[in-house]
Image: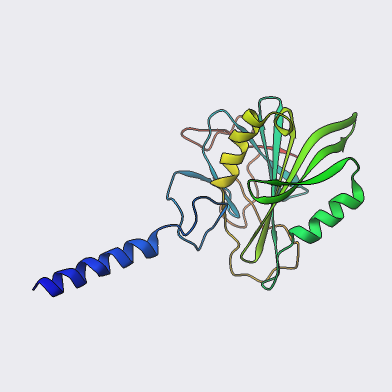
Amino acid sequence: MFRRRRREQSEQVVEQDAAAPARDSGPWDADEPHPETDRIDLGGLRLPHNPDFDVRLASVGDQHVGVVVLYEESSLQLQALAAPRSSGLWDEVKTKILAQAQHLEEREGPFGSELRGEMKVEDGSRPARYLGIDGPRWFLLAVISGKAALDEAVAAAYIDFVKDVVVVRGGDPMAREEPIPLRRPNEQPGEQADERPGLNPFKRGPEISEIR
């Protein structure tokens, strides 16, 4: 009896360990164990709720290709891309960014190597941090610009946000660096976005609007 009880208890421990996250924080892959919190479901990305953030979908034509989060005179741009099964994309993407931008230097950050410096905008330049995270068959690019690129206290809110993002790659074949499809929370896959002004699909948390 005692042996069986020990075996049953050990099996329960194994089951709990199997369901527990293998890492302390994300970004998470949808298929790996991760904290089950209430998130904003955008299809290819699931974002944590933060009522202080203004979350917007970035679109090219009819396709949603990224997310922009506004907070404290700063912005966070997120884009999830399909990546090869055999290797990540961050080293390659870093090389492209460095070739196109000036005044950037490589540093160690919360997700490993990142780029810090300035990014070009229409009226000049703006402080920026480029963070890249390689996942299983996906790559997440996070660009922090504005005040948060210089102020660690403001940046910490964005870093915590990125650490709780879930990437939903899906099993469909995708080309290298193809944007993982996003949608508004109230859309079903394949439906066109509802662009009625003032639409709020959430009971609480930030409202999703669009920028093009």
Q: Is residue 32 left or right of residue 11?
A: right
> Which residue corresponds to the image point at 85% horizontal and 50% vertical from the top-left?
97
Residue 141, above or below 157: below
Nearer to the camera, 117 or 42: 117
Q: Quick one: quadrant of the C terminus?
A: top right
- Furthest-left residue in this view: 1
Residue 212 visible? The answer is no
Nearer to the camera, 107 or 145: 107
Q: Give residue 9's position: percent from left, percent from top.
A: 21, 66
> Which residue corresponds to the image point at 47% horizontal and 60% vertical from the top-left?
22
Q: Quick one: quadrant of the N terminus?
A: bottom left
Residue 163 visible? The answer is yes
Q: Give residue 65's position: percent from left, percent from top.
A: 72, 50
> Which residue corresponds to the image point at 70% horizontal and 68% vertical from the top-left?
174
- Furthest-front residue in this view: 108
Q: Give residue 76's position: percent from left, percent from top.
A: 69, 38
Residue 212, above or below 51: below
- Quarter of the view holding residue 5: bottom left
Q: How is the image coloured?
A: rainbow
Nearer to the camera, 106 or 139: 106
What count of labels does the image hold?
0
> Which residue corresponds to the image point at 25% horizontal and 68% vertical from the top-left?
10
- Quarter of the view holding residue 139: bottom right
Q: Give residue 28's position: percent from left, percent from top.
A: 54, 55
Residue 74, above or below 63: above
